[in-house]
Amino acid sequence: MAQLIKRRTVLAAGAGAAAGLALPGAAAQAGGRHHPITVSFVLDAVTLDGGEQVVSLTLDTGRLGPIDPASLNAGTFSVHAKATSPIPIAPGDQIFSEYDLDRPVTAARLDRRGNIVLELSYAEGQLGGGTLGYIVSKGRNVQLDLTYTITQNAPLARRHGGPVTIERFVQGRLSNPEVDAFGYHVSGSGMKYRLYSPGHDKRRPLVVWLHGGGEGASLPDNYYDNETTLRANRGALGFATREAQRIFGGASVVAPQSTSFWLEDGPRFAPLIREIVRDVVRKNAVDPRRIHVVGCSNGGYMSMKMTSVYRDLFASSVPICGVVEALQEGAPPQLPDAELATIDTPTWLVASLDDDTVDPQANTIHAHDVIPGARMTLYDHVIWGGHQFPGHWSWIYVARNDPSIHGTHIWQWMAGRRN
């Protein structure tokens, strides 16, 4: 190109100041007047086992006329991403996964609507694509404020008409089809939850997903998003996949969000979760004999708490790396043996032996020894797709229907239970 254009000369996504600089030969002119072209774009995200990442950007370019795909390549556009906390971070505190960096474009293509899709580099554990940040002092995941800046480095050739330079990019919504399939709801008591419903008239099972401690609200910061429960991991999403729906014969999936964290006050939260279950059963085609509860970490504790309090409500329970021991030395256990021994809901416990957050021996293995007839799957490490995750993240295996005993996988086992 005869003229070098730096990234910063192009407008930051969503900002109000015009870049005003067009690439040579790319501006549309009429009577000597310049008509800048503005294009909006969507952030395309997927929830990986390790959390949600933005994997591509879709530019609304279909209206510009047929673009010659030969003019598109990984260098046609550059992308910069900035992610910041939605709530103030106190001095001395830390938030993991904020970033301000260039994101490599691995490919550029046209979708069936003629829109340009910029594929971005991403991978498990790769910094720079995540949508969540973890605030250390609060023990919470929060949905980061994302600002994406797109730079066009070369004109776009059209099949009809002259070349095109987009001078202003306007950032739109975050799109994650799996997450977006879950509707937003609030119970009569004010607890938020997300609900996936397959839309069948015939009564179908219901899976209740209880999140880990990092996905609760932070009410002192007025932060209660009803988002992180589906974006931090695939726990709830797994049960809405085509494979799970086939195994369960169609199932609704509900994901309540705690106003803090379940371990803070399990006896208080139990009836609030029960209220949500009752409402979902009443308003949807749910078979009350096929309600299943699954939870990880804090939610693993809460799933056992629910089956100890509501002994006839659930057809099965899957506590994953759940907590039963005392949180502090000298304090009573979260779930005493006498309470665990009353659980008669069919229970399948899951954990990894290298979990350094919740001791599997004192919690999962102990609960298995006390809960009558309980099953258990223990892993040495948490490895999926060639990536090793922290040992605490054993919910990944349940979200992938991996645990099995005598050839029966955990989803098939759940689907076969009725109370």
Image (tube, helix red, strand yellow):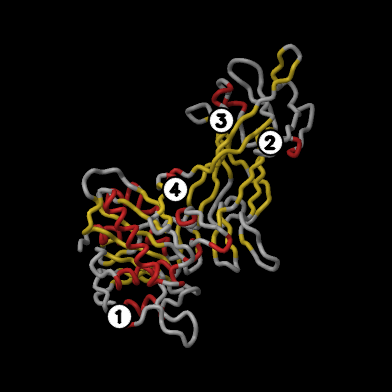
Q: Which amino acid does label 3 sit on?
A: Asp
Marked residue nearer the N-terminal end (3 or 4): 3
Q: Which of marks 2 and 1 is nearer the N terminus?
A: 2
Give neighbour class at mark 1: few <14, some 14-19, many 20+ (Cα, 10 Å).
some
Please report whichever mark, 3 or 1, sits nearer to the chain's N-terminal start. Answer: 3
Identified by mark 1, the residue type is: Val
Quadrant assignment for the N terminus: top right
Q: Which circle marks residue 60 in the picture?
A: 3
- In the rendered structure, the answer to whether residue 314 lies left or right of residue 172 reads left
Could you tell me how far apart the alpha carbons at marks 2 and 1 are, in whole angstroms? 60 Å
Which circle, 3 or 2, is nearer the viewer?
Answer: 3
Which residue is at the far bottom? Answer: 330
Residue highlighted by disc 4: 179
Tell which tag, 2 or 1, sits nearer the viewer. 1
The kind of secondary structure element at disc 1 is helix
Which numbered circle lies on residue 49?
A: none
